[in-house]
Image: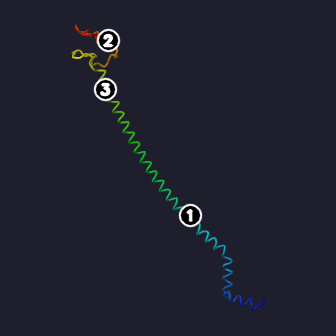
């Protein structure tokens, strides 16, 4: 190749400015690749942050739902406990009324009398027999 051929190629490539541009691109190709890679990484990070935000919102929504369910459960348990207390109190009142009921009908002397010390049920039946003998013509219980 002669010098004229080389000058023709250089002129076709843009002259001296073309050669300078080719040299710049050759030296800055790594920098450009790093810039492109950084841009791609930035886009990927942005997408990941959006996905994390979406997942955190979804998790917070589920937490709110679970909290609501637990609140409902606690309220239901409180209602059940209150109902159990009311039934237990009713059972206690019924047991107390059963213990204080008069075993002899139409009697002015209550057996058992209303005292703090109530006799056992077996003793009560025996006390009825002893305290009130059967009337003539009636059988004893």
Q: Which mark is residue 11?
A: none
Q: Residues within 10 Å of mark 1 (few under 14, many from 20)?
A: few
Q: Residue furthest top?
A: 136
Q: Residue at x 33, y 13 (%)?
A: 123
In this view, the residue in front, 16 or 125, is 125
Image marks 2 and 1: residues in contact by CB distance under 8 Å: no
Asked whether the beta carbons under mark 3 and mark 1 sit within 8 Å of each other, the answer is: no
Q: Is residue 45 left or right of residue 86?
A: right
Q: Where is residue 102 drawn, in percent x and y?
A: 26, 18
Q: In which quarter of the view is residue 23 placed?
A: bottom right
Tag 3 or tag 2, which sits nearer the N-term? Answer: 3
Q: Is residue 62 above or below residue 34?
A: above
Query: For the point 68% across and 78% down, which residue is it?
Result: 26
Q: Which residue is mark 1?
A: 45
Mark 3 highlights which residue?
94
Determine the CA span between mark 2 and mark 3. Answer: 23 Å
User: Residues under labels 3 and 1: Cα distance?
Assistant: 72 Å
SS for tag 3? helix
């Amino acid at each position: 190749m002669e010098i004229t051929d080389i000058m023709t190629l250089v002129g076709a490539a843009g002259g001296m400015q073309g050669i300078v541009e080719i040299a710049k691109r050759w030296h800055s190709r790594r920098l450009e690749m790093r810039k492109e890679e950084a841009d791609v990484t930035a886009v990927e990070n942005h997408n990941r942050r959006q996905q994390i935000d979406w997942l955190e919102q979804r998790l917070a929504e589920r937490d709110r739902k679970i909290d609501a369910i637990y609140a409902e459960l606690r309220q239901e348990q409180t209602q059940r406990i209150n109902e159990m207390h009311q039934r237990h109190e009713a059972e206690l009142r019924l047991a107390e009324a059963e213990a204080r009921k008069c075993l002899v009908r139409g009697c002015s002397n209550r057996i058992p009398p209303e005292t703090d010390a109530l006799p056992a049920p077996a003793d009560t039946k025996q006390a009825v027999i002893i305290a009130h003998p059967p009337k003539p013509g009636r059988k004893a219980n």
